[in-house]
Amino acid sequence: MTTDSCTYVIFGATGNLAKLKLIPGFYHLELENKLPDDTRIIAVGRRPWDKQTWTAEVKRFLIEKSGQGLDETIFAKFSARLEYHRGNLDEAECYQALATNVNNQPQFSKNMAFYLAISPGDFSTVIENLSLVALLSEEYGWRRVIIEKPIGYDLESAKALQKRLERHLTEEQIYRIDHYLGKGMVQNVLVFRFANVMLEPLWNRNYIDHIQITHAEDIGIGGRGEYYDGAGAMRDMLQSHLLQLLTLVAMEPPVSMDAEGLRDEKVKVLKSIRPIPKSAVHAHAFRAQYSKGTVKGEKVGGYLDEANIPGDSTTETYAALKVLIDNWRWRGVPFYLRTGKRLAAGQSSISICFRHPPLQFFRDTPVDCMNPNWVLLGIQPEECIRMEMTVKEPGLEMRTRTTSLDASFRNADERQVDAYEDLLLDVMKGDRSLFLRFDEVEYAWRIVDPILQYWATERDYIATYPAGSWGPTESQRLFEKEGQFWRNSL
Ligand code: BG6
């Protein structure tokens, strides 16, 4: 696919997402020489800045993020692409002036991407205004709008948002980001499954006992108290990123790797997930909140001590969910998903636990021969593929032990690409395979909505776990069998 030149407009350009992910993403694309010559990046912000101040600001935070100086030649090339447009999102003049600028100045490509790095509550305002000044019309070039999760607050609000978007945009123009899909190792799940024949015959209910998907963070909620307290871990991580990972692990081979082929198969997985009625929420879902504790040797406060969190908040910072997929391949194989802030380590992984062989010949040997095989896919911080197998210990006795087959696939000199770099480029290529289609969002909400509704009725109590732990041991109750446990190490 070719990368078209484009005018990227970032709404919310002075916010954290732009500062930490988008602008550094563009800069890395510049370093890799991936930006077509006439690509321009217009930052829209309320602050009374001009191009010069904005460029200095960009330079400052790029240095701050990378912890080193910048290559002056590359930065000069990059800064020539930067523009600053001062305006208030609520005011029509902001959009009129933007339209006049880009329509009348030849340096701006007529292909335009609008990145809404703003609060979801403002999505409709921006889109309606862009539409009013004809900036969404594709008469002279393509027009694409990128929105970030959370896409809605629940099923109903997600549908309402979709209705509002549909008035001004076609589905082909909407790029719903789930930045997890831009992570190298997440894409590797597809390659691992579908470019190798060794595992696919085992990838089903006959051989797999259960699957765990974990996103653990040792950090807290940072300065995002206001947003986070209204969202909680289930909405913030599980409804989006973790269910996306589940679809990649569980999907059937697609007809092709193009956007529709992939997304059709992902939706089929979401549709096959057994609904969780309110009466089963206790058996399928668990939530908790961190209290004060010690993370990596440092004493930290609890969630209720964080800025902008009401003292009686029962918002969950830890959520775990057991999911059953009622289809031919997975019937009876539980998928356990969990995520949490202020846990013992920052780590995302997929752990696949295989069944025991039909006969346990080595049952009487004294060592850990009862260990099942595991396939471990490390997403971050370490990207890895590992298999745990049982082997005979060297020596005269018939003892067994577990050994790990480690497929390191990244050479030391190979750079880890940030998810956003990949996704920003895909927008310019018009490749929507790593973006969500609305039915994916809708079915993901259908899964978690009953749980959220049930939790909303339990607002007077929430279990707690000390910061720096692996979460409350009560979450173990989700496991169906003895011998199943949360796997914390890779
Ligand atoms: C975001 C969530 O979508 O993903 C954050 O809002 C979370 O709460 C973040 O910390 C995790 O992403 P990453 O790429 O840092 O693992």
Image (spheres, grey):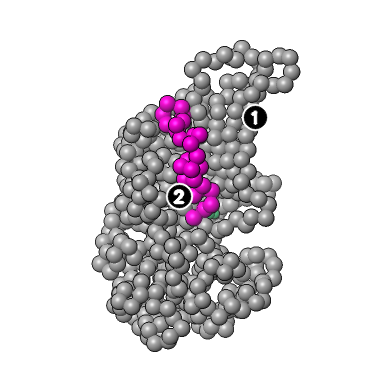
486 and 384: which one is in front?
Answer: 384
From this view, report whether residue 349 is shown above or below residue 418.
above
* Residue 293 visible in the shown view: no
* Residue situated furthest bottom in the rendering: 104
Q: Horizontal and vertical percent for residue 95? A: 37, 80
Residue 403 marker:
1
Residue at coordinates 28% horizontally, 69% vertically from top-left?
Answer: 168
Q: Horizontal and vertical percent for residue 218? A: 59, 48
Q: Quadrant of residue 433?
A: bottom left
* Residue 361 visible in the shown view: yes
Q: Which residues are magenta?
A: 182-209
Q: Quadrant of residue 243?
A: top left
Q: Is residue 452 left or right of residue 214?
A: left
Mark 2: few/some/many CA within 10 Å (<14, 14-19, 20+): some
Ligand 1 neighbours mark 2 (CB distance < 8 Å)? yes
Q: Reply yes or no: does residue 183 show up in magenta.
A: yes
* Residue situated furthest right in the rendering: 395
Residue at coordinates 39% horizontally, 42% vertically from top-left?
Answer: 253
Mark 1: few/some/many CA within 10 Å (<14, 14-19, 20+): some
- Quadrant of the image for the C terminus? top right
Residue at coordinates 51% horizontally, 76% vertically from top-left?
Answer: 37
Residue type of the residue flagged with mark 2: His
Ligand 1 neighbours mark 1 (CB distance < 8 Å)? no
Instruction: Measure how far apart labels 2 and 1 are at the Cα level.
Output: 31 Å
Secondary structure state at the residue bearing disc 1: strand
Q: Quadrant of residue 391?
A: top right
Q: Horizontal and vertical percent for residue 299? A: 66, 49
Residue type of the residue flagged with mark 1: Thr
62 and 406: which one is in front?
Answer: 406
- Upstream in the sequence, badge 2 or badge 1? 2
From this view, report whether residue 69 is shown above or below residue 302.
below
Q: Which residue is mark 2?
A: 241
